[in-house]
Image (cartoon, helix red, strand yellow):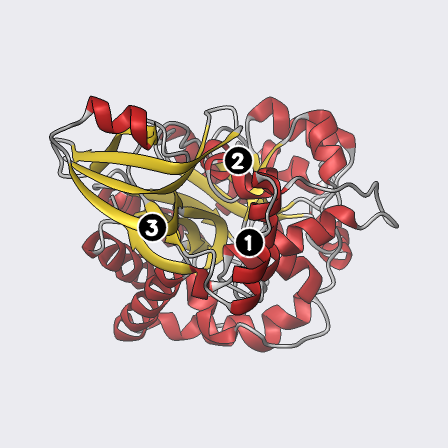
Amino acid sequence: MHAYRASLLRFSPEGEALFDDDGLLVTAPDQDGVQRVVDAGPHREVAARHPQAAVTHWPGRILAPGFIDMHVHYPQTDIIGAPADGLLPWLERYTFPAEARFADPAHAAEVAGFFLDELQRHGVTTALTFCTSHPASVDAFFTEARRRRLRMMGGKVLQDRHSPDGVRDETGQSLIDTEALIRRWHGQGRLGYAITPRFAPTSSEAQLRGAGELAARYPSTWIHSHVAENKDEVRWARELFPQARSYLDVYQGFGLMRERAVYAHCIHFDDADRQLMRETGAAAAVSPTSNLFLGSGFFDYAGAERIGMRHGLASDVGGGTSFSPFHTMLAAYCVGREGQTKPGLSLPPSRLWWNATGGAARALGLAGVVGTLQAGTEADVVVLNPQATPLLARKTAHAQSLEELLFSLIVLGDDRVVERVLVA
Ligand SMILES: [Zn+2]
């Protein structure tokens, strides 16, 4: 049993931010050797309950839940910051050539290692990532994640049409490969498999149907795709699937909407789409830096709230411009404020933070597992330094409330704030 003394940020299971200036977090390993939170709260109270625990003291630091990235592409690490005229040209010019290289297991292993280093440097301890259409890209990713004992989800991309040589897969084989990868990796330690059709336009009906059948046969797997990111893409999907009510409805028609189904973007939606998300338990991975970078549009937070659609935050690197949850939270705030194309609102800082931790966990079907530092959850913890830069030190010294403190970190923070990361 070990205890860590510092300021402590936690969340209630419902998403209320809880803060102790002088806090104590007590952890102990479970039977699998995974460190779990035993107790957490004000130092005075918690220390009295665990007099035998050895204490590490980090004065002036903040302990907080490890961040969660609901949607990212590890094979796009090297094309972050590649300019293009919107989504579809960007895929052709940069993404598909970069992903074609992942047929080589050595290249995949090298990028997977760098990617996970980068996530940890930014305090991200759980992510749902695309791999590429090559099974070797999945093996490389999970091998590295397992070595680091991280809670990670990923899967082989399905794309059997409208894709160039080098990334296009073959319908029957792609489904055989997916099932073999589910059996190899899903539920191994902290790893989870995600059935991953790239997006409806690059999969045949037979491939989408097969993906839906696998999703029914393995109900604890994730489903991971994109929807309604860009208006040209929406138009294309509607042409290819004229029988569906909407782009989102294509996925519903193939059995690809349920709990643990995660759709990146969800921008060009109507209320019927939002209702379908709510009714099926699917979740939106909101990717604000990517949406701003590619000029895709603005996620409608008021609409999501009005209907009760599950959502959380994502970097979407390489469309996204940063692995940093601080940058993502700030971009989400700006997207929320935008009030010309949809209602604008000011998302409270503690809500933004929740969307990057416990709220993202809940949207992913991982409530009670990670993201809150509640007792019983896995102890993925970041140690933050609110004085990491001169301006941050000056600003946080004058914070009058928790919301002011969190907002200073969101606006001015980056990887320099993340002093260390404790993985389970
Ligand atoms: Zn994406």
- Residue at 33% over, 50% down: 59
Specify few, some or many for label 1: CA neighbours under 10 Å numbering under 14, 14-19, or 20 or more: some
Tell which circle, 3 or 1, labels the residue nearer the N-terminal end.
3
Q: Amino acid at mark 2?
A: Leu
Instruction: Indicate which label's residue lies in the foreground, 2 or 3.
Output: 3
Q: Is mark 1 within 8 Å of ligand 1?
A: no
- Which of these two is toward me, 295 or 108? 295
* Residue 202 seen in the current view: no
| Label at residue 396 | 1
| Residue at x 40%, y 32% (from the top left corner) | 366
Above-or-below relation of 339 to 89: above
Tell me residue 299's x, y (percent).
71, 46
Q: Position of residue 156 (x, y in %)?
A: 39, 54
Q: Amino acid at mark 3?
A: Pro
Gap in angstroms between the C-alphas marked 2 and 1:
45 Å
User: How many other residues sit within 10 Å of disc 3, few (<14), some (14-19) or many (≥20)?
Assistant: few
The reply to whether dot 2 and dot 1 touch (C-beta < 8 Å) is no
Q: Amino acid at mark 1?
A: Thr
Q: Under tag 1, what secondary structure? A: helix
Seen from the viewer's position, the closer of residues 396 and 243 is 396
Residue that carries the numbered disc 2 in the rendered image = 256
Q: Nearer the viewer, mark 2 or mark 1?
A: 1
Depth check: give the residue in front, 23 or 143. 23
Quadrant assignment for the C terminus:
top left
Q: Residues within 10 Å of mark 2 (few under 14, many from 20)?
A: many
Measured in 3D between alpha carbons, the distance from the residue under mark 2 to the one under mark 3, in whole angstroms, is 48 Å
